[in-house]
Amino acid sequence: MIIRIMGEGQFDVADVDQDLLQKYDNQVEDAVNAGNEEAVRSALNSLQEYVKANGSPVSDDYLGSSDVVIPFVDATLAEIAELLTGEGFIPDPA
């Protein structure tokens, strides 16, 4: 799975702990649903840091699309909510 973090680039997260990735994603979704902007920023930052630290950066010449897009940390609550699906940013595993 390729994740694009707006302003940061794309990361291949196929080899990361998917349960932990999903945990971070769920924290963002829960904070958005609660309308808690401070918690959203904190959870979004944690998700981004996990992806950057554990995913593999995708080459700049990669022309494929991203499977998931994660917004800027300073995006508005409405902008973040708009990018969420019913399963957060990252679809829940089957």
Image (cartoon, helix red, strand yellow):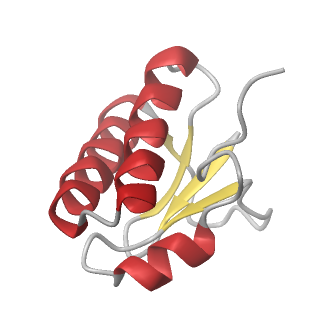
Asked whether 58 or 6 is in front, the reply is 6
Query: In the rendered image, is residue 17 in sight?
Result: no
Q: Position of residue 86 (x, y in %)?
A: 71, 52
Q: Position of residue 84 (x, y in %)?
A: 61, 62
Tell me which residue sits at (60%, 53%) in the image: 89
Q: Is residue 82 above or below residue 16?
A: below
Query: In the rendered image, is residue 48 in sight?
Result: yes
Asked whether 59 or 51 is in front, the reply is 51
- Describe residue 56's horizontal placement relative to residue 24 as left or right: right
Tell me which residue sits at (74%, 54%) in the image: 67
- Describe residue 45's horizontal placement relative to residue 75 as left or right: left
Q: Position of residue 25 (x, y in %)?
A: 47, 41
The N terminus appears in which quarter of the rendering? top right
Tell me which residue sits at (20%, 54%) in the image: 39
Q: Position of residue 9 (x, y in %)?
A: 47, 65
Q: Hey, which quadrant is residue 94 in on the image?
A: top right
Asked whether 71 or 79 is in front, the reply is 79
Tell me which residue sits at (27%, 48%) in the image: 43
Q: How many marks?
A: 0
- Describe residue 1's horizontal placement relative to residue 3 as left or right: right
Asked whether 26 or 50 is in front, the reply is 26
Q: Is residue 16 above or below residue 24?
A: above
Q: Hey, which quadrant is residue 10 in on the image?
A: bottom right
